[in-house]
Amino acid sequence: MKQIWSVVCTVIILGTLLSACSSSGNQSKTDQAANGDGSNKQKEVTIKVVEYKNLEGYKDIAREFEKQNPGVKVEFSYINSVDFDPTMKARYAAGDMPDIFNNWNVDVWKDFYEDLSDQPWVGDLFEGTKGFVTRDGKLLGMPYIIEGAGLVYNKELFEKAGITATPKTFTELKAIAQKLEDSGTQPFVNSYGEPLFQLGAHFFNNAMDRVDNPVQFIEDLRNGKAHLVGNPLFERMLDVLRFSAEHGNHKDLTTDGNTQANDLVNGKAAMALQGNWIQDNVNKSNPGLKMGIMPYPFTDDINLNDKINMQIYSLAVYNKSPNKEIAKKFLNFLVTSDIGKKTLVEVFHQVPAMKTIKPTEQFVGPINMDLLSYLEQGKVVPVAFWDYFPIATDIGQVLQKFVAKKASSTQTLEEIETLFKNWR
């Protein structure tokens, strides 16, 4: 997910900031402006939105919100996901915290989030989305957009090779790769030149999410109570990694995610470890191309291979904001107003976290509709590894050595274990 995930991963922001007033007198005026009950000459409240997706459609939503809330102004700015943490820490140190911001790394910022459990949109959420932002019984954000990572594939190239069903096991994946090669199609295009997203986040997560209790397993790894060496799941992960490299682009260690996405969309390969966000590339480069997304079959156990890795793009309210109520009102407007719902589907082309917002393939595309189908069936699993993001790049670099055949399977797993033990 080179967005949630650019999936998969850095840290995201959609922040709404209200201008801070320099005195309690100014704060009183701000409250009056937000509530619309001040004097005839109201002080304008500016809501500053900081977000990582840089979606232009927010401006139309903002203008309508301003129209319905006199005295309130909404401004947007963009910070890329990689710079999220250092930027937010700098803002906090400077006393410049936003009123609404993305809560990708919930456990790092949980003490700064307002509990949104009583908000009117809570009952509209898809099952399983609240868990991403719930801590100690408090809903610390509003799930907004759903992103999913797995094997994105070109349905037209599958049809050309006579493939009528997606693979459910690693053995079936190998057979399909052979059929693709027999038809003259390269099975995989990889971007293993990106240690963070492609390897450390997305690929490693595909194995970690298949563990019975990923969070506990990660803690056990850190404490030396669990091991990757000798674990069949993680040994198979390396088998899959080697297989995809052998049947993919030969320069995969120098290929980035944008090149990978373009090669997939332009028919140079049939499959890629990617996410639903690649639908944007399809819309721009090859509209009408039949694409889909499926779980990455890492094992020969069908029950471990039937779910898409899911990540939530969510928004949080700063719990010390002097303008919390108007901030909550804006969040509600995003998902309940006609313009908010329409923009999410028809302009953003995203899968909503709300059951009450109905996307169609015309606007969101076939990849997103596949993701929605898995979501409606409950065939999604939360990404387990995001809270351990500080070492995702390091893990990716270890996996790069394996792809380059500079480390054995045992050496690779031992080195990743050491990363977990040393990270505090």
Image (cartoon, rainbow, N blue to C red):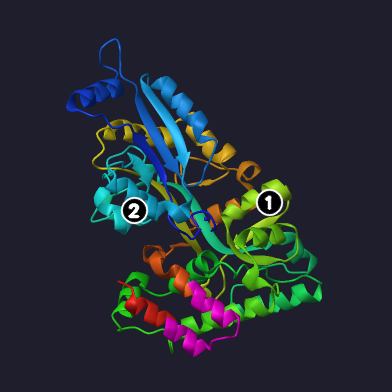
Up the image or down, 59 lies above or below 266; here it is above
Horizontal and vertical percent position of residue 366: 64, 51
Instruction: Please name the amino acid that badge 1 sits on.
Output: Val
The answer to whether residue 301 is visible is no
Rendered residue at 67%/66% (across/down): 271
Residue bearing mark 1? 282
Instruction: Please name the amino acid that badge 2 sits on.
Output: Val
Using the image as rendered, state which of residue 209 and residue 93 is in the foreground.
93
In the visual, does 294 lie left or right of 318? Answer: right
Magenta region, residue range: 396-415
Rendered residue at 63%/45% (across/down): 361
What is the C-alpha distance between the residues marked 1 and 2?
A: 31 Å
The answer to whether residue 23 is visible is yes
Using the image as rendered, state which of residue 388 and residue 172 is in the foreground.
388
Horizontal and vertical percent position of residue 311: 45, 57
Rendered residue at 60%/85% (across/down): 405
Residue bearing mark 2? 133
- Mark 1 touches mark 2? (CB < 8 Å): no
Rendered residue at 36%/52% (across/down): 130
Up the image or down, 233 lies above or below 377; here it is below
Q: Magenta span has 404?
A: yes
Using the image as rendered, state which of residue 202 and residue 293 is in the foreground.
202
